[in-house]
Image (tube, rainbow, N blue to C red):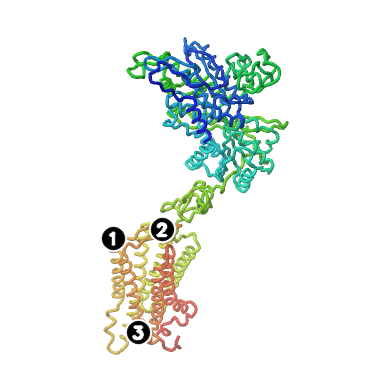
Amino acid sequence: MWAVFHISMLLCHYIAPTLSSSISSSCQLQGQFKLNGMHKAGDVVLGGLFPVQFMSAFSELLFISKPEDPTCHGFNLAGFRYAQTMVFAIDEINKNSNLLPNVTLGYSLYDTCIKIPVGFRAGLALVSGKDEQFIMNDTCTGNPAVVGIVGDPTTTGSIAISSVLGLYRVPMVSYFATCSCLSDRKRFPSFFRTIPSDDFQVRAIIQILKHFGWTWAGLLVSDDDYGHNVARSFQTDLVQSGAGCLAYLEVLPWGNQPSEFKRILDVMKKSTARVVIVFAYNSYLLHFMEEVVKQNVTGLQWMASEGWTTASLLHTPHLMPYLAGTLGIAIRRGDIPGLRDFLFRVRPDSDHNIVKTFWEHAFQCRFAPPPAGWVDAGGALCTGQEDLGNLENEIFDVSTLRPEYNVYKAVYALAYALHDLQQCVPGRGPFIGNSCANYERLEPWQLMYYLEKVNFTTSFGDQVSFDENGNALPIYDVMNWLWLPDGSTKLQAVGEVKKSASGSEELTLDEDKILWNFELKQSPRSVCSESCPPGTRMARKKGQPVCCFDCIPCSEGKISNASDSTECITCPEYFWSNSRQDSCVPKRIEFLSYHEPLGICLTAASLLGTFICAIVVMIFIHQHSTPMVRANNSELSFLLLLSLELCFLCSLLFIGHPKRWTCQLRHAAFGISFVLCVSCILVKTMVVLAVFKASKPGGGATLKWFGAVQQRGTVIFLTSIQAVICTVWLVSYPPAPRKNTKYYNYKIVYECVIGSTVGFAVLLGYIGLLAVLSFLLAFLARNLPDNFNEAKLITFSMLIFCAVWVAFVPAYVNSPGKYADAVEVFAILASSFGLLVALFGPKCYIILWRPERNTKKAILGRGTTKT
């Protein structure tokens, strides 16, 4: 509001036109401001605005009521050196025959007193000129006093001045105003700058944060246009880049406000963020840092904006225990050969009031009389011949030229634009009718056209050109504050951030040079939550920034193979997550294997059963002539033993990796083997009943249907039916191996699908039919005389067989994967052992241990006791 009030008064006082009844042929100044400046005539004049002196609060109040006569005091050596750098650059250009030949550049520089109203007044004075009156030509136009201005250094001043200059397209090239708002070409169409905008400054800070992994930081900004604009830009860019989050955002007040400083420091101390970013000028930090020292706030990594990175006022032993190790970005340092010698040749000429002010400040003398309107410096009279070589002054230190280098580039940018304008060929120009501009009637907008297209390289090797928003190619030096053992301080460059012409941004750091002000002498960690390792995902904490999260392990079957994953990825069908949940591995394959305990036990049982059958066969062969073996068709007994061996062996087809041939063979072998076995038992039962019936009067004719040939034929016929069932099944819907992932998520079950449920059901049903029929016939013959007591053994064996297979069906249906195969193998082995023991156990017992019963007489039941 103060700035608006000042500007309004200035406009009313300074540029209000005097109306007359007739059109005048000349322009008349309504008044002149008394400005401290320095001037040099030339064919083309460039203007400059520099902060050489200060204005006291009392002088500012006086200026409001009397704006034409401000009073400034003190002296800003840096601002004076900026002004002299412009003078040096123009002098260097005038001596260069290759740049602007036959054209002499002049300059008109004014002191802004680091105040917006003074700077605004100086800007108006530059474009209006110093002449009381100038004659207008027939087109009612006249040559402007300056064709371009270097300045203003402040953001607010640049906004105020450029708002007016932009109306007339007068180019203004700032060397220190960084606000990104000045990139708005609609509001500031003629504004350019050689310093990077705050947008790039923000991105440069964010790149440093990303480089060190600092995702949790606090932000302090100054309470002015610079700070407010940076705060908005920083928050937006930080979110878009995904580099981190702000733990807090606080505004530093102007002046000494201890209560507000304490409140801000309380926020900082409570926060877990160890990195503090400060966008402000050093004037905002002086009192704040005193409060930091007072409260002994340590353990923080400070990051400085270019506004205070190089501020020598803060490089004191008093503050270094807290600020040592600070990382900041600084305006690009440049080398300007000859500037130091030029500064030693400065003399207080009559038209150089700024130099006279410097002279009075440097030698503590005064000119007689002192410049009107300025504070008397006091002391001896100045002769103007004092020796600058006797001064120990920082103005002659040209080792770290930063804003000066921007001033140097700004002057050369205007000079190269004028040079390009000079090289225009009539008839090929860029203006109406292919015309060219000329120095006699040069319009500022014509120079602005060439300034937008300027492109050159400085002697220091930096390329200078402007983008569509008037910003030069940005580059910053990354600086580190060193606190040396002897107590002195040093500002050391440790890298750079720059944007190339192609648009890419690059950060280069030499971390070995960086001093860390921590016990471990290494980069601190500043995160809200530690990084989530692979195998977990981030789950944001409710009501907190995205950088604050919990690490949730991925669920089974899902993985995250990178740190800080937001989601877990589901593994493909035949893969599963490993124990760390960070990679998908092939699922474990499961089948009834020969190498696992269950498979080993079943295999051993199968081989044991086969071995026992072989022993029984050997016993029967050895005792083939004995009545016990010959009774009830020994041929069927040997065939029954062979079928039992096949039953024991077919169980091995259910163990091992399923293959197509094993899947097809296992059920066929199982079905045929058991039908052969049960068929032999059925025929034996039928023979027992036939013999009993033949023993009765008139029953002899029955035996002719149960001779050896008929028995053999019956077994073959019944078995061939099962063979036909298996053949039809295998041809139409053959069983096949399959990878089954439905039983378990974490493993693949290799199994044999039966192909046709109907075929499998018919196979089992046929076995069951023969078994039930055998059981019923044997049950009917159970009470026959002891001569035919094998029926009891058959009844018992069939009872075991049926019981096993009745229990098999529900167990098989409810057993997943390899356990279904194990149940089927167990049923095969159990029923086979039941038949073997029930049918052949008693006979082997008599043959081996009761040979006296192995006689025809004993078997027929004559002269012996009942067994």
Of callouts 3 and 1, the N-terminal one: 1
Check disc 3 and report its element: helix, strand or loop.
Answer: helix
Q: Residue furthest right?
A: 486
Residue 463, horizontal then vertical, whole percent = 49, 23
Which is closer to the viewer, label 3 or label 2? 2
For residue 490, what is the image quadrant? top right
Residue 397, horizontal then vertical, whole percent = 64, 22
Is residue 517 something one can see in this rendering?
yes
Give the Cα separation between the discs numbered 3 and 2.
Answer: 50 Å
Give the Cα separation between the discs numbered 3 and 1.
Answer: 40 Å
Q: Residues within 10 Å of mark 2 (few under 14, many from 20)?
A: some
Of callouts 3 and 2, the N-terminal one: 2
Q: Is residue 857 left or right of residue 90?
A: left
Q: Which mark is residue 634?
A: none
Residue, disc 3: 780
Placement of the C terminus among the 4 image quadrants: bottom left
The answer to whether the residues at label 1 and label 2 have Cβ atoms under 8 Å apart is no
Q: Residues within 10 Å of mark 1 (few under 14, many from 20)?
A: few
For residue 496, what is the image quadrant? top right
Q: Is residue 267 above or below residue 449?
A: below
For residue 631, what is the image quadrant? bottom left
Residue, disc 1: 731
Q: Is residue 58 left or right of residue 733?
A: right
Q: Is residue 628 above or below residue 645?
A: below
Of callouts 1 and 2, the N-terminal one: 1
Please state which amino acid type lies under the numbered disc 1.
Val
Residue, disc 2: 741
